[in-house]
């Protein structure tokens, strides 16, 4: 258990509120579940979960290895059924993009007037950038969120606006890839930047 200030991933400003943080270390990863406040009637815990795959230090690891299977619709469907047993939560056919890349979600009606959302995102630099031991590592993000009287768009704002603050102290760990070059118009008169 850890305090909310030790979270490696944060919901957007304004909430939902962090209640506590649960850490687990593996031989190849750190998994953190950020428990979010819930006032919903649907059973289960609201959370934002991040699994950071990267180089662990010998003293910081547990004995287990955290497996990472590539994204498969069937495996995400199993995750959704496990999180919302008996509820009608349907996957969207669309993908969206936040500051970390593409993500998707499933949403539906929970108990009472609850709206529930399950979001997923796997962050990894493109294969063309993972050469010469650069831009390695990956982050698996999951969001489970139910709120009474909320719209899907309101819940989806958490997936659009969460912030990752965790990292590894390794020059080769960079699941985001090489940043884009600065806009060539920056600093030129007559080219406002908003």
Image (cartoon, rainbow, N blue to C red):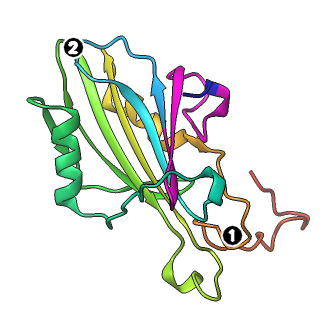
- In this rendering, is residue 167 above or below 183? above
Q: Position of residue 54 (x, y in %)?
A: 57, 63
Q: Position of residue 151 (x, y in %)?
A: 32, 25
Seen at 45% across and 41% down, the residue is 49
Task: Indicate the quadrant where residue 129 lies.
Answer: bottom right
Residue nearest the observer in this picture, 65 or 38:
65
In the displayed structure, does residue 28 sit left or right of residue 134?
A: left
Residue in view at x 30 percent, y 39 percent: 118
Apparent side of residue 36 relative to residue 188 in the rendered image (left or right): left
Q: Residue furthest bottom?
A: 132
Task: Assess whether residue 179 is covered by the magenta stretch.
Answer: no
Dot 2 falls on a residue whose secondary structure is loop
Q: Position of residue 104 (x, y in %)?
A: 34, 51
Please give the label number shown on residue 179.
1
Q: Please tell me which residue lies in front, 1 or 105.
A: 1
Residue at image coords 15%, 40%:
81
Q: Residues within 10 Å of mark 1 (few under 14, many from 20)?
A: few
Q: CA distance from mark 1 to mark 2?
A: 42 Å
Kindly identify the residue that appears in the image at 24 percent across and 12 percent down: 41
* Residue 6 shown in magenta: yes
Q: Residues within 10 Å of mark 2 (few under 14, many from 20)?
A: some
Residue 39 position within the rendered picture, expressed as x and y whole percent measured from the top left: 36, 11
The residue at which mark 2 appears reads as 113
| Residue segment shown in magenta | 5-32
């Amino acid at each position: 258990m850890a305090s909310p200030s030790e979270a490696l991933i944060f919901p957007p400003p304004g909430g939902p509120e962090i209640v506590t943080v649960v850490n687990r270390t593996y031989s190849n990863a750190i998994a953190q579940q950020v428990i979010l406040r819930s006032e919903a009637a649907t059973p289960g815990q609201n959370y934002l979960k991040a699994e950071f795959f990267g180089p662990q230090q010998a003293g910081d690891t547990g004995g287990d290895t955290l497996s990472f299977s590539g994204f498969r619709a069937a495996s995400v469907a199993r995750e959704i059924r496990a999180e919302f047993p008996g509820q009608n939560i349907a996957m969207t056919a669309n993908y969206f993009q936040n500051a970390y890349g593409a993500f998707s979600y499933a949403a539906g009606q929970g108990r009472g007037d609850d709206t529930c959302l399950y979001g997923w995102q796997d962050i990894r630099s493109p294969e063309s950038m993972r050469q010469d031991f650069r831009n390695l590592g990956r982050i698996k993000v999951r969001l489970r969120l139910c709120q009474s009287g909320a719209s899907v768009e309101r819940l989806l704002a958490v997936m659009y606006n969460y912030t990752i603050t965790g990292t590894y102290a390794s020059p080769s760990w960079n699941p985001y890839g090489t940043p884009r070059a600065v806009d060539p118009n920056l600093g030129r008169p007559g080219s406002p930047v908003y």
